[in-house]
Image: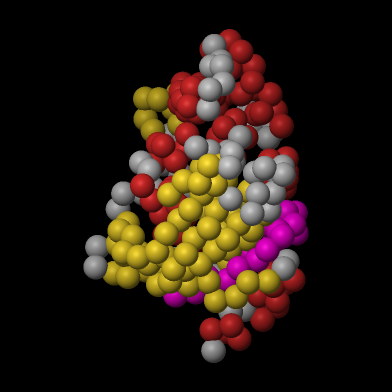
Amino acid sequence: MLEIKNLHAKIKETQILKGLNLKVNAGEVHAIMGPNGSGKSTLSKIIAGHPEYEVTDGSIEYEVNFKKINLLELQPEERAREGVFLAFQYPVEIPGVPSSVFLRAAFNAICRHQGAEEMDPIDFDKYVRSKMKLLEMDDKFIDRPVNVDFSGGEKKRNEILQMAVLNPRLAILDETDSGLDIDSMKIVAEGVNKLKKKDNAVILITHYQRLLNYIQPDVVHVLYDGKIIKTEGKELALKVEDRGYDWLIK
Ligand code: ADP
Ligand code: MG
C-alpha cells in the first residue's frame, strides 16, 4: 500500500530525513519508535503533505484500488481524499468551526471523490454520534469548535474520532497515546483495532511500548537520525522498552 524509498527531506536548511525506506502492506499495523528529534513527526507530516518540508530525494508510492499514486505529486487535500489520514502529535484548534461541520465536510469530500453518496446532516449526525459512543466521548464535543479549549487528552480523542468517522485507508497516528491516561489509551487502542481491516493499514508512531500492549503491531521500526535503523516483529518494542535505543545506535 505504501512504499517509501530513499526519502530525503529538509526544513529550511536542516536536513532531517536522510534516506528513509519503509514498506507497509494493506492489512498491517506498523509501529515506528525512536528517540525525540529522530524525524518521526517529520515523516508523518511529509506523507500527509505538509507544505513546510522539502523533499530533496526519494519517492513515496501509494497504491489504492490497484492504482499506483505518486503521493508527492498530490496536494494535502488530494491525499486525504485518497484515504490518507494523519492524527497530529499536536492537534490544531479551529476557532469558529464546529466539529460537526468540519467532520461532515471532510467526510462528504471523500465520498464525492470516491464516488459514494454524500450524507445529509441528519444521517451524518447519527453516524457521528454512534462513533462517539464507541469512543466514549461526550456529546458536547460535536457542537463545539474543533479542539478549542479541549484538554490535551480530549484533543487526542478527537483525532481518533476523526479517524473513526473518515475510515481512512492509511492512518498515521503521531504519538496519539502521549498525554492520555490509561483508560483513554485503551479507548484509542480499541479505535485502532476496530479500524484494522484487510484493506487498511495503520502506522503508529509511539514513544512508549505501553500502547503496544493494547495494539499488536505486525512490524516495529526504529527511526533514528532520519533513517529506519532496525525493523523486526513486535518483539522489538519489548527490547527497546528493556534496553533503550543505545544498543541500536552504537
Ligand atoms: P520526532 O517526532 O522524532 O521527535 P521531529 O520530526 O519532530 O522528531 O523533528 C526532527 C528534527 O527536526 C528535530 O531535530 C527538530 O528540531 C527538527 N525540526 C522539526 N521541525 C522543525 C522546524 N519547523 N524548523 C527547524 N527544525 C525543525
Ligand atoms: Mg514527534
Camera-side residue of 45 and 99: 45
Residue 103 visible (yes or no):
no
Q: Nearer the viewer, residue 244 or 53?
A: 53
Q: From this view, report whether residue 82 is shown above or below residue 101.
A: below
**Left or right: 75 in relation to 66:** left
What residue appears at the point 55 percent right and 76 percent down from the top-left corner? 229
Q: Quadrant of residue 16?
A: bottom left
Which residue is the extreme one toward the left?
Answer: 13
Magenta range is 207-225
Residue for point 47% across, 64% down? 5
Residue 74 screen position, x and y as percent: 38, 43
Q: Is residue 242 magenta?
A: no
Coloured how? secondary structure
171 and 138: which one is in front?
Answer: 171
Q: How many marks?
A: 0
Q: Position of residue 28 (x, y in %)?
A: 68, 53
Going by the image, does 10 lie left or right of 59?
A: left
Q: Is residue 214 visible?
A: yes
Residue drawn at the location 53% of the way across and 71% of the way down: 228
Give how far across and how far down residue 203 sits, in percent: 59, 54
Between residue 181 and residue 86, name the one nearer to us.
86
- List x then y, in percent, for residue 72: 38, 51
Vertical placement of 47 versus 164: above or below? below
Q: Quadrant of the C terminus?
A: bottom right
Q: Residue furthest bottom?
A: 250
Residue 221 on the magenta segment: yes
User: What residue appears at the point 58 percent right and 71 percent down from the top-left corner?
Assistant: 222
Image check: 43 left or right of 157?
Answer: left
